Image: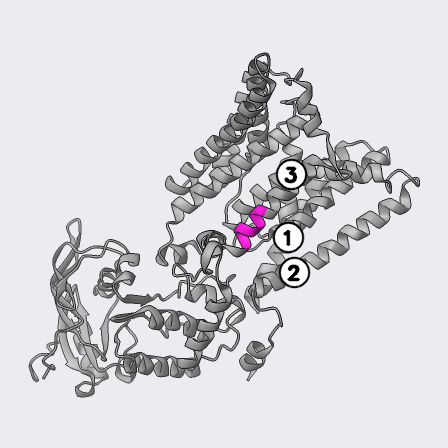
Amino acid sequence: MTPPVVPVISVRRLTKSYGTVEALSGVDLDIFKGEVHAICGDNGAGKSTLLKILSGAISYTSGELLLDGTTVRFSSPHDARERGIETVYQDLALAGDRSCAANIFLGREILMPGLLGRLGVLDRKSMNRKAQQFFGELSISITDPTRNVRAFSGGQRQGVAVARAAIWATHVVLLDEPTAALGVRQKGAVRDLIERLKERGLAVVLVTHDIPEVLAHSDRVTVLRQGKAVSTRFTRDVDMQWIVGAMVGQKVDGAAA
Amino acid sequence: MTTQSLSSRKEPWTVTGLLSRVSGMNTVWITVALIAEIVVFAACLPPGTFVSIYNLQTILSDAAVLLILATAATLIIVAGGIDLSLGSTLTLSAVCAASVVRIVAPQSEVLAICAGALTGVAVGAIVGAFNGYLVAYRRLPPFVVTLGSLGVALGIARLTSGGVGISGLPESIRGFGQGYWLGIPLPFLIGLAVIIVFWFVLELTRFGEHTYFIGSNAEAATRGGIDVPRHAMGLYTMAGALAGFAGLVDFARFQVASVATGHITELIAAIAAVVIGGGSLFGGIGSLKGTFVGVFIPIILANGLLIGGIERFWQDVITGFILILAVWFDQWRRTSDVAR
């Protein structure tokens, strides 16, 4: 069923131990370009451990992590970002007292040309202009990127965080519980954003325990349970009952392999 | 849609963004408060005393050291930290510089001044680096670290000087510390230059942007690839060096490196200036433009009280209350911001 292309991310027998406790024990996973891949599981199933490994926050104990077919081991979130993997954290990781543009360009600031640039002087005009352009492309309702993030609603802040990921990601965007703190209408906006990430040819990994969200947004779903990948299916082939069953450990692979 | 109307309310000067707009508003308010202060003193004090060229020069001279110290405090506070040791760092630096000057002066006065200046700044930087290491790399709370080094630096200063101020210094330093250029006191011009340079760094450069970012959300800064401990270490070191430099200016002006007070009054006034100027002790907010205006509120207060013949210790009392009020206001502003 899977297309004959190299997965953007391949996880092979991935294990992460904390002392004698195994948070992940031998997870296999393939994530392809242009798909929204949901990873769900109950609390303690290993979702956030997997997310942290993919985003570069922690390293793995054994197994293999391949990016575009090459083995990688990220030393920091910055390292993962350098390789085109962007993460949208649940807390969004935005500085409320800085402008939307400044948040978008954090760590990747545009400097003035010439001597001023060598002194480290920022080219705020260019950054504001580009931020505005990005927001337009992603249909995010922020018309003035010079305003502080604090001035915007939860949904708009989410938009800023997702936009930042979309702009810099070349391979994968990891979304951690993206709609946990949002209202119904804002959830719809995030769904549209996820669609646009797909259109840009990015792989989107959606880590969540919100099953309706999985069913609504994802193309495929992997259920984790007690540190293992229980099953991976096309989302259209499953329903809420199946996912819940897989999460709590009922036999799921009896129906079809 | 409310969000639409919110975001379409565009200001014409978008370059420096909302921060400058907010702090700009703040600067307007404190400027009004400052003018009110001046008007009250001008009205209440005998004519020709408060409002006079001589007194204006005195006020500017008095502001010099505080401008530099408040610049240091702004750097730290914007990044979400606090440095209580700035006053005693100033004291220690001045004492060390004075000692070096006294030793070298018999050989060459020029050499003595250069060596003294270098010593003062270096000693300040060392105290700052000590603070920075413990805060940034050992993750100790800055309040406690800098309270500790406040005691350490003042103790060492008193040990070095034998508990008394160091005076009896070459005449040429006096020229520097009490000189004028076009009627403007030299120390003030130096303080002004320092605050302008750091305004440039904080407002316009990537280093400044990262400083604000760390103060606003250090975790996000780390995830964004900023080496937060290194940056914080740099800031504390810089603040210490600035305190050392302020020590030199103080020493040049008064001809004596005093160890009596540990410059606690100046420390309180410096932190008050930052907060009055719109700086938030929660980090992420503040501007040197605001700090510049903020500095003159305690300075003019002290000056007016002195001319009015009021016991000068009232200055500490009032400045202390002003600091508390300013922090209270900041807290109120923050919580009402969150509630919105």
Q: Amino acid at mark 1?
A: Lys
Q: Which mark is residue B289?
A: 1
The segment highlighted magenta reads B197-203
Mark 2 vs mark 1, CA separation in Å: 8 Å
Residue B75 higher or lower than A155, as above or below: above
Q: Amino acid at mark 3?
A: Ile
Q: Amino acid at mark 2?
A: Gly
Q: Which mark is residue B24?
A: 2
Q: Earlier in the sequence, mark 2 or mark 1?
A: 2
Mark 1 vs mark 3, CA separation in Å: 16 Å
Nearer to us in this view, A24 or B196? B196
Residue B49 higher or lower than A195, as above or below: above
Mark 3 vs mark 2, CA separation in Å: 24 Å
Q: Residue A106: x and y, percent?
A: 41, 61
Q: Earlier in the sequence, mark 3 or mark 2?
A: 2
Residue A128 higher or lower than A36, as above or below: above
Residue named by callout 3: B190
Residue shown at the point (72%, 45%) measured from the top left: B296
**On the picture, is A143 further left or further right than B322?**
left
Outermost residue to the top? B106
Instruction: Give the chain letter at badge 1.
Output: B
**On the picture, is A46 further left or further right than A112?**
left
User: Label 2 neighbourhood size at 10 Å, few (<14), some (14-19), many (20+)?
Assistant: some
- Between tags 3 and 2, which lies in front? 3
Instruction: Give the chain letter at badge 2.
Output: B
Quarter-wise, where is residue B169 in the image?
Answer: top right
Q: Is residue A13 magenta?
A: no
